[in-house]
Amino acid sequence: MEATGVTGYRHFLALFMGVSLLVPPVLGQTAARPEPSDWFAGDAHVHRGIGCGREHEKEMLTAQQLLEMMKPNNLAVISVLSDIGNGELKYVEKDLPLMTGKDNPVSTPDRILHWDAEWHYDPDGVTFDRKVIGGHLILLGLKQGGQPFAYYTYPILEWAKSRGGIGGFAHMQYLPFAFYPPPDGILHSLDCCAPMEFPVETALGTSSFLMEDVHGSDSALQAYYKILNTGFRPGLVASTDYSCNYLEPLGTLLTYVRVPEGKLTYDKWVDGIAKGRTVVSRNGHNEFLDLRVNGESMPGDEVGLAAKGPVRVRIEWRSLKKAIGRIELVQNGAVVASKTAEAGPGSPAVFETTADFRRSGWIAARRMDWQNGHQTHTGAVFVIVHGQPIRASASDAEFFVQWIDDLIQQTSPGGAWSTFLADDREAAQDRYRKARAIFADRAREAQSQAQSNP
């Protein structure tokens, strides 16, 4: 969920344009799918309260209505998130009992509705007493619900794990990485939703994925690249955050997840997210990027090389609509090869190239639009050279050291954010210091690798 002011503006815009708040506009349903049969499209960030559930909410969508709303973008899965945080959504008491760990009864063989949770206590622009700076957590695969509270995100991620689920950070598009390069990309002020603790809990192994939502931006990718460059492997996810983003259908931002045996269940879909077997789309269920490395390896996979050398890359851009764009191969955060191409129904664009690896790293593919940035993006394929860990960028590891230094300073007594950790400061900052030490070690390891493999 996002800030009240933005939601109020969208509500006004919807009324001005005569757009229904209950059912979003239909883009045109089609049975065609651009993805292979063992990939499944879904939206992992959906709420059933109208208009972010705030002052103008009058009702909640039913499960049957949500099922119908999956059809415009032909979704196989949606995660309907109960607000287990500050109670911002009205009628939350009706959502909580639906977190059973089982698919909702209205689910069909082709469409799964499943109730999970979003947790947050916004630090800015809100009136409720409890405020937390860590960010919004999306919790998937829970076997039972609840309403936990903590002043930092780690206890909530552990709570989700104890209930059989995984957690990750939403709203990665709130980060300024696409506009302000380091060190200016470090956030020094608060807003509703920025994922302040994402480097900490990614480094310490409790966060499983990073999510862009509400239109997304290339900032989300820059955060993803930096984390990959330090050797961590979170899943990449895109979702709408309906109904905060209620002017567009469910799945306008969506995630394709690979289920290797092709037999979809909700648990397998969530497991695919955790393992990085994803491709994300910002333009609905219209296009897909099929990335193959050395013929077989796909997003989430690992390729081993006995010595430095090239890998073969094949990228196929499939589109249900005629489109022109640029296919790009990204290696360790930089574009190393690209091709301007046209794709359409029955006419995929294919880009074949090679990528040279002198030390361990990663590659991913993206389809770029000249005005709007990435439209589709694959999860990473990891290339391990001579058994070395991925330490692709000392500067990115050092960036996260600076990020955490600022977080410690701001939350210490006298700091601008000190009141947020008045009760749990030592426990939270102990997490910060442990993560900082990991990034500092990886910065040194990256420097050593670079010197050994210039």
Image: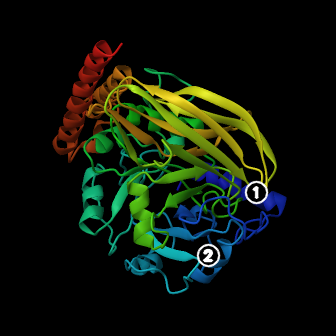
Residue at 28 percent of width and 15 percent of height: 452
Q: Residue 178's quadrant in the figure?
A: top right
Q: Is residue 60 above or below residue 302?
A: below
Quadrant in the picture for the C terminus: top left
Residue shown at the point (73%, 49%) measured from the top left: 348
Question: Residue 23: x and y, percent?
Answer: 71, 71
Camera sees residue 86 = no
Q: Image point 25% across, 58% down: which residue? A: 158
Left or right: 1 as drawn, with respect to 435: right
Identify which residue is drawn at 38% across, 80% down. Answer: 100
Toward the bottom, the furthest residue is 105
Residue 304: horizontal and vertical position, in percent? 34, 39
Residue 196, given in percent of the width and then of the height, sits at 39, 40
Can you say whether 392 is above or below 291 in the image?
above
Q: Is 152 placed above or below 163 here?
A: above
Q: Are marks 2 and 1 in contact (CB under 8 Å)?
A: no
In the image, residue 300 lies at what x, y percent? 42, 49
Please rate how many residues cluster around mark 1, counting C-alpha atoms within 10 Å: few if below 14, some from 14 to 19, many from 20.
some
Q: Decide: few, some or many residues near mark 2? Use Cα within 10 Å; few <14, some 14-19, many ≥20.
A: many
Can you say whether 296 is above or below 50 in the image? above
| Front residue of this view, candidates 238 and 422 | 238
Q: Mark 2 or mark 1: which comes first in sequence?
A: 2
Q: Where does label 1 land, which residue? A: 320
Q: Considering the numbered disc 2 on the image, is that residue within a helix, a strand or a loop?
A: helix
Amino acid type, residue under disc 1 in the picture: Leu
Asked if residue 53 lies left or right of residue 351, the reply is: left
Secondary structure under the numbered disc 1 in the rendered image: loop
Identify which amino acid the numbered label 2 is placed on: Leu
Q: Where is mark 2, residue-wise?
A: 66
